[in-house]
Image: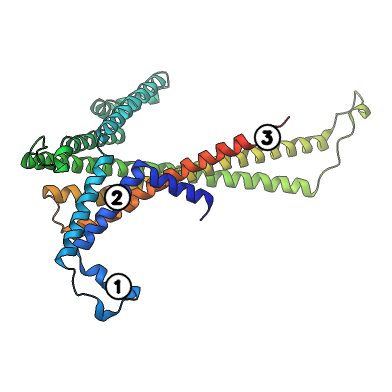
Amino acid sequence: MSQNTFHQFIKFSTDAYGLERTLRFLQSLTQLLLSYPSLPLALLPFLGFPAEKIPRSLSAQKKFTLSELKNRLSLGRRYFRLFRFLESFSQAFDKYIEATAKSKAEGKKSSSSSSSAKNKAKAGLAVGLLLGGIGLEKWLEILSKGFNGVYYCAETATFVDELKVNGLAVWGRELAKKVMKEGNRMWFFALILAVLAGGWKVARLGGEIAQTRREVKHLEKEVKRERSGLTSIVRAPPPPPPPQSTRGKGQPGGGWEEQQWRDQEMRLERVKMGEAKLEELRVKLDRLLDTRYKAGRRAVADILDMAVPGKAVGWVPFSTGVVSALMLGSTWLTGLEVWEKCGESVAKSAAKGEAKAKPKSE
């Protein structure tokens, strides 16, 4: 394990999101073991346990222990989500402000452009009036964050009742269950909108990636053509132009040789500019591919997560074991997202430390 990986693990294990994902992974694993108690027993022979000493099923006491562990892990996760609704509503509001500001800036830019932009604006007038100029993808993200905030509100409102302390309650057991059922509906709607937004984003990025790849291929051909012409000149260079002092007023001043050297310099400059542009396009392509991969991964995690609130409100006809397996998969995917963010944070901190430790040149 490298030093950066070790610091990344420390960052993940002390981060609120990382801890919540870790507890969720353990909760889903415990719930999966409760649903399929024979699963851990079937794995014991591979761990070296004698087959005759392995019980055929879990005892009632062990099932009760696993059930209590699952409930405690679920309650422990709610401590990290206590006021998460403020974050969700804030993200929805920030996305709305950012989208409206960008829409106004693009509107001012298009108003000063040619008539083609006016025709395009007329063609999209109905959509523009419907979406307020923000765009469908942004609206889906904003609404998803809003519905998610309502779900976190329900969790925060029923937190005291979930503690199950005698003589301490806000809603009462039955009403708290109804509030959480409505909260799970909001969570289900939030996940649907998030999946639609993720799918829209993946499709949009796919178009940008295809366009960038076409630009890269076209520019590679141009650079190759220019470089081949430059190579032919370098292989058989003309003699250098005569010095300026030896030229008389009546002489042509360089002639064919000087023109060839000018062409060579211009071609070399075009090759350098093309290679620099190629590097920018390749970096952009890598960034787009990484963004599309992460957006697709998040959409898959949201699809898997839909089983959890869907089961709670009775909209998904899955067994508890299947829901636990899907929950385990979504936790792994979203945990990878948190792990990568912690790695980026550690890399930035390491880069800043190296920059400070580097002595200044005189």
Point out the image quarter for the C terminus.
top right
Q: Could you classify mark 3 by the number of other residues whose Cα lies within 10 Å: few (under 14), some (14-19), or many (20 or more)?
A: few
Is any part of residue 26 visible from this angle?
yes
Residue in the picture at 12% in, 49% down: 315
Question: Who is closer to the viewer here, 163 or 175?
Answer: 163
**SS class of the residue under badge 2?**
helix
Asked if labels 2 and 1 touch by Cβ distance under 8 angstroms, the answer is: no
Q: Is residue 35 above or below residue 166?
A: below
Residue annotated with mark 2: 23
Dot 3 or dot 2: first in sequence order is 2
Pick the front one: 140 or 121: 140
The residues tagged by marks 1 and 3 sit, at their Cα atoms, a distance apart of 57 Å
Residue 78 position in % (x across, y down): 24, 42
**Three-letter amino acid code at disc 3?**
Pro
- The residue labelled by disc 1 is 44
For residue 193, side relative to residue 47 (left or right): left
Report the residue marked by disc 3. 359
Residue 254 placement (x, y as % from top left): 85, 32
> What amino acid is found at the position of numbered circle 2 in the picture?
Leu
When asked about the image quadrant of residue 163, the answer is top left
Check the image and name the residue furthest to the left.
Answer: 174
- Number of labels in the image equals 3
Image position of 67 (left or right of 5): left
Colouring style: rainbow
Q: Quadrant of residue 244?
A: top right
Q: Residue at x 52, y 39 (%)?
A: 349
